[in-house]
């Protein structure tokens, strides 16, 4: 059985639901844009859920001690199982210092995005692995670390012309049907040939994701996180829901 997928949900996605996925993550908690502290902390979660703090709003002078206090209150009251610092703004010294501070402040696992995980004694949150990239290529750098994997259904389109190649992401909503299976990359693909170009389309099915998570576990990955809006129609993936 592959590692379970923690489904990241917003408050709006949780509203009105009588049941939630077995593995839930709360997303969209961020730094307050109008003062000190955090915005959009959850009021309730199933015990064991992952709390995600992102930097969609820049940290911009927030006090690490206050951030830690607010997170601790929330984590303790909701019995969270882990904290994920999904910081995606590179080169922010305040974010680096806050990640270092929070990793030491909590006994529960605190995963940090691979942008800021160097030099920290914590799980590393590895950014999504593209359908054209071997998993070992991305994970080798983090050998010996606990790894959490950012998982996505986003596909890829590669256009080859005599001038070179260009790539573009393909949203899950545009995922084609059929195609040929590429088991080493855990994806499906198709090729379209034109007069002056070749177009390679790569995407992942529920079976591909399950195979990817199974290999990830063999390579030492201990957790995976994906968006509820992408994975909710994929009951074949553990952690997904109908």
Image (cartoon, helix red, strand yellow):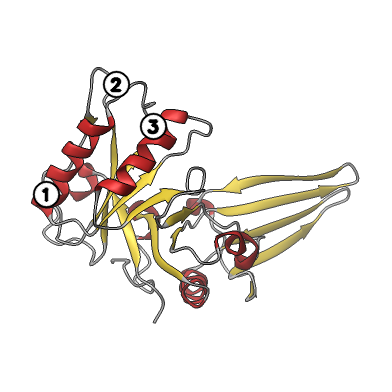
x 52%, y 71%: residue: 212
Rendering coords of residue 120 (x, y %): 44, 50
Q: CA distance from mark 2 to mark 1?
A: 23 Å
Rendering coords of residue 151 (x, y %): 46, 58
Q: CA distance from mark 1 to mark 3?
A: 22 Å
The residue nearer to you, when weighing 223 against 180, is 223
Label number found at residue 105:
none
In the picture, the quarter occupied by the N terminus is bottom left
* Mark sitting earlier along the chain (1/3): 1
* Mark sitting earlier along the chain (3/2): 2
Label number found at residue 56:
3
x 49%, y 57%: residue: 153
Write down the residue under mark 2: 33
10 Å crowding of disc 1: few (<14), some (14-19), many (20+): some
Q: Secondary structure at mark 2?
A: loop
Q: Single out the residue that lies furthest toward the bottom.
A: 1
Q: Secondary structure at mark 1?
A: loop
In the picture, the quarter occupied by the C terminus is bottom left
10 Å crowding of disc 3: few (<14), some (14-19), many (20+): some
Write down the residue under mark 1: 44
Rendering coords of residue 154 (x, y %): 52, 53
Q: Single out the residue that lies furthest toward the right.
A: 162
Contact (CB < 8 A) between labels 1 and 3?
A: no
x 62%, y 67%: residue: 136
x 20%, y 31%: residue: 66
The residue nearer to you, when weighing 164 against 173, is 164
């Amino acid at each position: 059985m592959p590692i379970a997928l923690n489904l990241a949900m917003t408050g709006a996605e949780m509203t009105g639901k009588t049941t939630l996925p077995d593995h839930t993550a709360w997303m969209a908690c961020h730094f307050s844009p109008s003062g000190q502290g955090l915005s959009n902390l959850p009021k309730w979660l199933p015990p064991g859920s992952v709390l995600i703090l992102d930097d969609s709003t820049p940290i911009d002078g927030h006090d690490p001690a206050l951030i830690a206090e607010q997170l601790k209150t929330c984590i303790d009251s909701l019995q969270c199982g882990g904290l994920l610092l999904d910081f995606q703004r590179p080169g922010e010294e305040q974010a680096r210092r806050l990640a270092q501070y929070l990793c030491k402040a909590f006994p529960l696992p605190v995963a940090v995005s691979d942008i800021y995980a160097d030099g920290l004694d914590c799980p590393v949150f590895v950014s999504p692995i593209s359908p054209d990239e071997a998993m070992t290529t991305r994970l080798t750098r983090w050998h010996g670390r606990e790894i959490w994997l950012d998982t996505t259904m986003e596909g890829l389109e590669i256009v080859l012309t005599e001038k070179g190649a260009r790539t573009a992401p393909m949203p899950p909503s545009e995922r084609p049907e059929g195609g040929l299976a590429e088991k080493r990359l855990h994806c499906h693909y198709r090729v379209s040939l034109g007069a002056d170009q070749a177009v390679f389309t790569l995407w992942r099915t529920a079976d591909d994701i399950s195979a990817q998570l199974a290999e990830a576990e063999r390579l030492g990955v201990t957790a995976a996180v994906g968006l509820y809006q992408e994975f909710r129609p994929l009951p074949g993936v553990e952690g997904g829901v109908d």
